[in-house]
Amino acid sequence: MFHYFRRKPVFIIAILALCILLLAVFIFRQSIFPQSANNGQATGTLSASAARTGRIFGAAVASSHLTGDQQYANTLDTEFSGVTPENEMKWETTEPERGSFNFAPADIIVSHAQSHNMKIRGHTLVWYSQLAPWVNDIATGSELLQVMKNHIANEMGHFKGKIWYWDVVNEAFNDDGSRRSTNNVFQQKIGDSYIEEAFKAARLADPNAKLCYNDYDTDGINEKSTAIYNMVKDFKARGVPIDCVGFQSHMIVDQVPPDYQENLQRFAALGIDVQVTELDIRMSTPVSDADLQSQADNYQRVVKACLAVSHCNDITVWGVTDKYSWIPQYFSGQGAALLFDDNYKKKAACNLVIQTLTSGS
Ligand code: XIL
């Protein structure tokens, strides 16, 4: 044997070359497909698997947790490629007194996101809720319009060039498709035109930011989503700037609308982007393994719907971890709605989302 090789150096070189080639193929596969499924456990990250489909996977973030909880920051940085400030860009925080602006809490999130190459969704400029109380006392529609435009110009001006998509107007419709007027000073004093005025002011303030209308209970085809669809169609026809509709997707386990994908698709067909902006799927607590599996299936349906619509470019969950989710506080007896549990462990839903994104690429 030894003599044979000594007399045939060509064979040795060929075998060595073959070994090197096999090693190179192995290394290449590992770097291209580092997170293939392993015993049913996804081993990759949300951000990497979403990136291979050309999408962002984001989370709503609170500045207090970002600075106060290292595990929170680590999970965000490892798993997510986008952020939405959960409360820090809302009017009550950014303009608590007329003409006096405070962007400090939001700046913490924005600079963290920038230094980690994450996309930032601005949330939200015009909303009846979490509004500074003084705005409700403005006497006339014309004055309120000026106040609203000034707010948009200042807030978008401060973050100019840093925001990927802005939620310009949030939650302006009722379930029956009529305009939300109760507690909504903008609708009451300015009237229907406040939405288009807000979008026009937003385009002027940061022409490079994409502009979204954002709402909840619009995940299937219903009276509310159809009213928004008609508004977007009208805006497009009249040249009112709008680039996107955000579907909050605060949902209940086993109640994901069957026409979720069809709904996203009809909006995308209007020539806009669609984004899943505040996804969570809540359950009665405490939860069983079967609940966690149903939740995983529901999350998978949402991801598959987004993957099927080319203009669906972002899935953002409304929080990094169940530990700080808004759900238990707002929906009594409900919770466990997110992808990481109280101890930052990946839930079944998280693993299935990663697997679905991985096979979807
Ligand atoms: C929620 C936050 O998560 C809570 O911390 C806050 O107390 C209330 O608002 N729709 C929206 C979000 O557009 O801004 C809301 O966020 C959840 C519902």
Image (tube, rainbow, N blue to C red):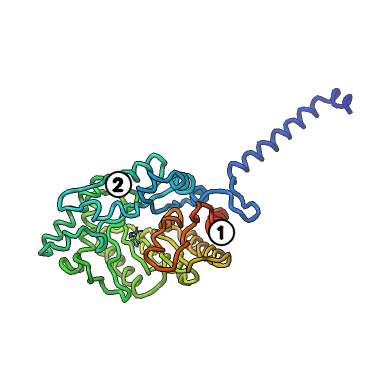
Whole-percent x, y for residue 160 in the image? 27, 45
Residue 83 appears in the picture as rendered: yes
Secondary structure of the residue carrying numbered label 2: helix
Dot 2 or dot 1: first in sequence order is 2
Image region (quadrant) for ligand 1: bottom left
The residues bearing labels 2 and 1 have C-alpha atoms spaced at a distance of: 33 Å
Q: Residue at x 31, y 57 (%)?
A: 167
Q: Is residue 170 above or below residue 101?
A: below
Q: Nearer the viewer, residue 135 or 148?
A: 135
Residue 314 appears in the picture as rendered: no
Secondary structure of the residue carrying numbered label 1: helix
For the N terminus, the image quarter is top right
Whole-percent x, y for residue 353 in the image? 53, 57
Q: Amino acid at mark 1?
A: Ala
Q: Quadrant of residue 111?
A: top left
Q: Is residue 285 above or below residue 60?
A: below
Q: Nearer the viewer, residue 118 or 207?
A: 118
269 relative to 8 in the view: left or right = left
Whole-percent x, y for residue 327 in the image? 40, 63
304 relative to 128 in the view: left or right = right
Q: Amino acid at mark 2?
A: Pro
286 relative to 14 in the view: left or right = left
Q: Which residue is mark 2?
A: 105
Q: Is residue 138 above or below residue 20?
A: below
Whole-percent x, y for residue 74 in the image? 46, 44
Within-10-Å neighbours for mark 1: few <14, some 14–19, many 20+: many
Q: Which residue is mark 1?
A: 348
Q: Nearer the viewer, residue 109 or 3?
A: 109
